[in-house]
Image (spheres, coloured by chain):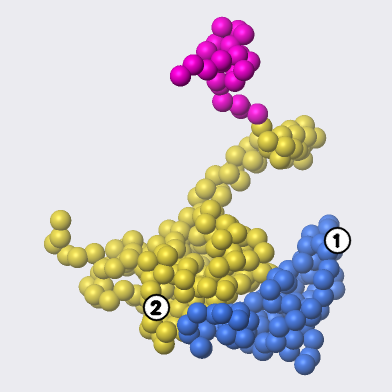
Amino acid sequence: MSTDLSTVNPATKDGHDHPHPKHELSYYAKRIYAIRELLIEKGVITQEDIQRQIDYMEARSPANGARLVARAWVEPKFKARLLADPKAACAEMGIDATSINEFVVLENTANLRHLVVCTLCSCYPRPILGRPPDWYKSFNYRSRAVNDPRGVMREFGQGLPDDVEVRVHDSTADIRYLVLPLRPPGTEGMSEKELAKLVTRDSMVGVVDPLPAIPRGGS
Amino acid sequence: MRVRAEERPGHIRTPFYIRGRVGWVEKVYGDFLNPESLAYGRDGLPKRTLYLVGFHQKEIWGQYRAGAQDKLYVDIYEHWLEPL
């Protein structure tokens, strides 16, 4: 097969014989870089401020949520506090949830599952779970989580019988929601630390239950 | 109550699919600065009361699959709600 490279890649004129990827910045990337430069130039913020904010955003992760959930599983009094005043319970665990206007924890039970979505954008309890995954922000999830939550859960690996109630929370305003998932069966002997490893990010959004108990003595 | 079936341009925190639908107030969250004003650099005043409003899934979607007791909850500001 012969191809006239000069028609595909103008660079061949310079002696190249292969195309190069474009490294052009998008319109919005250019705009945000320009704004950043201006803010620094005008002394509104410094490069260090930006780095500190990036570090802060990266430091928040689902591990925060997993610690809350595992503690709630092993300590009923903490669970009661977490449900009654989630921000105070976070403070107790050294988790900074002060940037959330109103924080609500939704408790799953054997007959009830909660699922959280933001159909308008990507509202998410970031101090507790970090940055939302791409699927949470996708049009597909945002539309189907409200009108077919059971179908969405099935795709995440969780089929639910009809007699288990499903409550979807569309988090459209100042409230941020965290699901307190059910403690998996067979985890009675596990420590709080071990339990926290079963608490996945997705289980705290509510699309699926936590991981099953790790079999003891298994390979 | 019913969610107002208005069409307005701009930064609106009431999703389209729930406008004009009938639900119940499950909980009153309190008063918050109005995000529909804050989004445009205004002061967000007066504060608006935010409600947790519940809906029956079967009533919202014609072809909702399974779970007759399934519910949908949306956070809605007072100026988007009207009595029946």
Q: Specify the quadrant of the image occupied by residue A97.
A: bottom right
The residue indicated by pointer 2 is: A160
Q: Within 10 Å of the Cα at label 2, are there few (<14), some (14-19), or many (20+) other Cα atoms?
A: some
Q: Which residue is drawn at 40% across and 62% down?
A: A200
Q: Are marks 1 and 2 in contact (CB under 8 Å)?
A: no
**Residue found farthest to the top:** A15
Q: Within 10 Å of the Cα at label 1, are there few (<14), some (14-19), or many (20+) other Cα atoms?
A: few
Front residue of this view, candidates A191 and A121: A121
- B76 lies left or right of A165: right
Name the residue type under label 1: Arg
Q: Identify the colour of chain B in the image.
A: blue
Q: Which residue is drawn at 15% across and 60% down?
A: A218
Front residue of this view, candidates A166 and A211: A166
Q: Which residue is drawn at 44% across and 70% down?
A: A153
Q: How many labels does the image show?
A: 2
- Does the magenta run of residues contain A205? no
Task: Examine the residues drawn in magenta and state their main secondary structure.
Answer: loop
Q: Position of residue B7 (x, y in %)?
A: 82, 71
- A157 lies left or right of A90: left
Q: Residue at x 56, y 15 (%)?
A: A4
Magenta residues (range): A1-24
Secondary structure of the residue carrying tag 1 is loop
Between circles 1 and 2, the one closer to the viewer is: 2
Distance in Å between CA atoms under marks 1 and 2: 45 Å
Residue A212 is tagged as none
Secondary structure of the residue carrying tag 2 is loop
Front residue of this view, candidates A192 and A164: A164
Q: Which lettered chain is shown in yellow?
A: A
Placement of A70 over or under A122, stated as above or below: below
